[in-house]
Image (cartoon, helix red, strand yellow):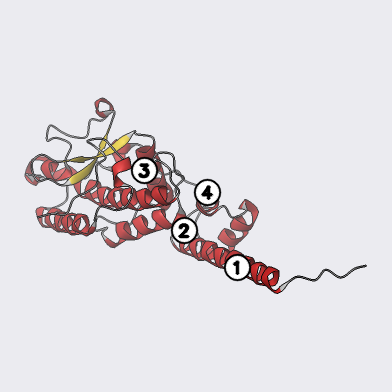
């Protein structure tokens, strides 16, 4: 059998291809480890990384201690009934939107057509968990549903005409009954807190959430591909003056 001999340039090309593949595998494994750390379930890890489902399930069974039973709330009204939670989830969606636009621009796709990457989801989820003061962070599957709802135009980021903050609003607002006559903005709904004391947190906690919200939105800068995401509800978050 004749031995196949490669030229120096061919050997260099093969080595480069192997290195690229190894680097890609390392990136995927890093994302898998980070998703396991936030206790994401196998179906979400498979979707975000493309890693084989059987291997993901084996890793999940070994690394994550969480009961497989139980459903997550997927009704928007239930998720953002409390103004402070509404603020926290708005932070997540604002960060996710900006990160996703960057990925879509790199892939030369519309933000609504581009698949959700592990990078953009994890970046937004980390910002969300850093700003949670209302209790335990919601599981990643629920926030993935929130991202999918935005991609499907079921929800949008809207600007409050009073204080210019961005917040999540359903595009089918008639189905929601959690506004209690105070408008959709969580900051507007939280004031005064005494009239709906059972449904809000105390005023100093609202103020803390508001400060977090303002600070996080101030960090968001217009990124590449912003112009592809047209529409009054989905324009890029602006820095606070």
Residue, disc 1: 22
Determine the secondary structure under disc 2: loop
Q: Within 10 Å of the Cα at label 1, are there few (<14), some (14-19), or many (20+) other Cα atoms?
A: few
Dot label at residue 146:
3
Camera-nearest label, 1 or 2: 1
Q: Residues under labels 1 and 4: Cα distance?
A: 21 Å
The mark closer to the camera, 4 or 2, is: 4
Q: How far apart are marks 3 and 4 (CA)?
A: 15 Å
Position in image of residue 59 (x %, y %) = 59, 61
Q: Residue 47 carries which label?
A: 4
Front in this rendered view, residue 65 or 50: 50
Label 2 or label 3, whichever lies nearer to me, is 3
Ranked by sequence position, the earlier of labels 1 and 2 is: 1
Q: Considering only order in the chain, which callout, 4 or 3, is on the residue closer to the N terminus?
A: 4
Q: Which residue is drawn at 53% across and 61% down?
A: 28
Foreground tag (1 vs 4): 1
User: In the image, is 178 to the left or to the right of 99?
Assistant: left
Residue at 31% x, 59% y is 127
Residue 5 x, y percent position in the rendering: 80, 71
């Amino acid at each position: 059998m004749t031995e196949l001999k490669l030229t120096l340039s061919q050997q260099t090309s093969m080595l480069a291809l192997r290195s690229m593949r190894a680097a890609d595998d390392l990136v995927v494994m890093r994302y898998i480890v980070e998703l396991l750390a936030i206790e994401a379930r196998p179906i979400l890890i498979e979707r975000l990384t493309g890693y084989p489902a059987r291997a993901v399930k084996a890793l999940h069974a070994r690394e994550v201690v969480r009961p497989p039973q139980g459903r997550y709330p997927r009704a928007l009204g239930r998720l953002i009934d409390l103004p402070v939670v509404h603020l926290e989830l708005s932070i997540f969606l604002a960060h996710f939107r900006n990160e996703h636009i960057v990925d879509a621009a790199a892939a030369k796709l519309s933000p609504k057509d581009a698949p959700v990457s592990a990078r953009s989801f994890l970046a937004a989820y980390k910002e969300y968990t850093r700003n949670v003061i209302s209790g335990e962070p919601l599981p990643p599957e629920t926030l993935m549903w929130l991202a999918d709802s935005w991609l499907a135009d079921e929800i949008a980021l809207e600007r409050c005409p009073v204080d210019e903050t961005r917040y999540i609003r359903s595009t089918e607002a008639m189905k929601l009954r959690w506004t209690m006559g105070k408008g959709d903005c969580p900051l507007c709904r939280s004031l005064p807190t005494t009239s709906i004391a059972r449904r809000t947190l105390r005023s100093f906690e609202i103020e803390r959430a508001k400060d977090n919200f303002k600070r996080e939105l101030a960090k968001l800068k217009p990124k590449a591909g912003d112009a592809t995401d047209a529409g009054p509800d989905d324009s890029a978050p602006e820095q606070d003056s």
